[in-house]
């Protein structure tokens, strides 16, 4: 409804809002994308896995059920961790409310790290280095990342997107590969490529299909309206890549 003179609306952050609203698969392609990639590269029983940015925990639970692995699932949004703990109960699955950028695991802790639409919400180079250090020799990072599809994204447009979503940067596919090599990864492959318009036209749920709810605050409603507007405007400019990045055995 229109605001009265002197009134104002507090606009919450995008990341906080999707957690509060319980968006289950807040990454492009959703569960189908995750399962498609990980069924192609099955995990091994009893491996130690970090789900970096686990959301509501559905993928973490699926990993335990499907592959009988041990999963530590971390998210910095308390609302997601609360939902995950209520929803999932497995002996080999633990949920932790923590910010990956400030979390410290011992070196060479994990066989596999899964990070879907998380890295670019943080200083990219530093978080990639953390992933690398946390992996055992020969360990694998499966990660879905935001990309710019061409060089037509202006500085002002990039700034608008980063400010609204809380992204730290928007890299091209090539820039991601360079960043991964600089972090130490010895092998990088692109398992899946998609533009935002491709995701919008598919049947897969994604972070760009957030439902409106009658119980939302005015600020949340305005945020999701803005999100829809940006999604339409940049549908051909933005996309995602699902990388498989391997740490050398030595």
Image (cartoon, rainbow, N blue to C red):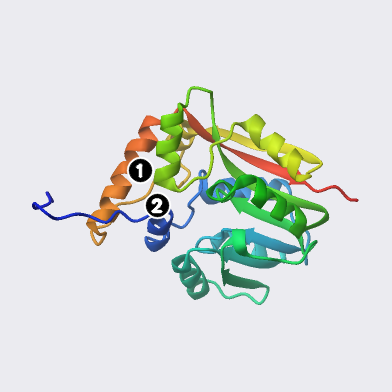
Circle 1: element type: helix
Residue 24 on image: x %, y %: 46, 57
Which residue is identified by label 2? 14
Q: Is residue 49 above or below residue 159?
A: below
Q: CA distance from mark 1 to mark 2?
A: 8 Å
Instruction: Give the quarter of the image for residue 225.
Output: top left
Circle 2: element type: helix
Q: Nearer the viewer, residue 111 or 200?
A: 111
Instruction: Give the quarter of the image for residue 190.
Output: top right
Q: Residues within 10 Å of mark 2 (few under 14, many from 20)?
A: some
Q: Residue drawn 54% across and 51% down? A: 31
**Residue 218 visible in image:** yes
Residue 62 on image: x %, y %: 61, 62
Q: Is residue 247 left or right of residue 151?
A: right
**Residue 208 visible in image:** no
Which residue is identified by label 1? 227
């Amino acid at each position: 409804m229109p605001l009265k003179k002197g009134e104002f609306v507090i606009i919450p952050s995008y990341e906080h809002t999707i957690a509060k609203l319980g968006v289950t698969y807040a990454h492009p392609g959703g569960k189908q994308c995750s399962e498609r990639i990980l069924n192609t590269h099955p995990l091994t029983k009893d491996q130690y896995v970090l789900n970096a940015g686990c959301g509501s925990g559905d993928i973490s639970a699926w990993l335990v059920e499907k592959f009988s692995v041990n999963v530590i699932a971390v998210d910095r949004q308390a609302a997601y961790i609360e939902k995950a703990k209520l929803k999932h109960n497995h002996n080999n699955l633990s949920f932790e409310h923590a910010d990956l950028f400030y979390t410290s695991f011992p070196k060479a802790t994990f066989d596999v790290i899964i990070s879907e639409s998380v890295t670019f919400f943080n200083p990219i180079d530093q978080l990639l280095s953390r992933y690398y250090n946390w992996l055992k020799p020969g360990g694998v990072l499966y990660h879905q990342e935001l990309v710019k599809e061409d060089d037509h994204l202006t500085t002002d447009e990039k700034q608008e997107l980063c400010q609204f979503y809380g992204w730290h940067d928007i890299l091209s596919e090539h820039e991601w590969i360079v960043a991964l090599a600089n972090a130490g990864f010895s092998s990088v492959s692109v398992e899946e490529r998609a533009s935002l318009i491709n995701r919008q036209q598919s049947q897969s749920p994604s972070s760009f299909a957030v439902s409106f709810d009658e119980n939302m605050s005015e600020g949340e409603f305005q945020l999701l309206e803005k999100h829809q507007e940006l999604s339409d405007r940049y549908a051909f400019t933005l996309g995602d890549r699902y990388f498989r990045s391997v740490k050398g055995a030595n």
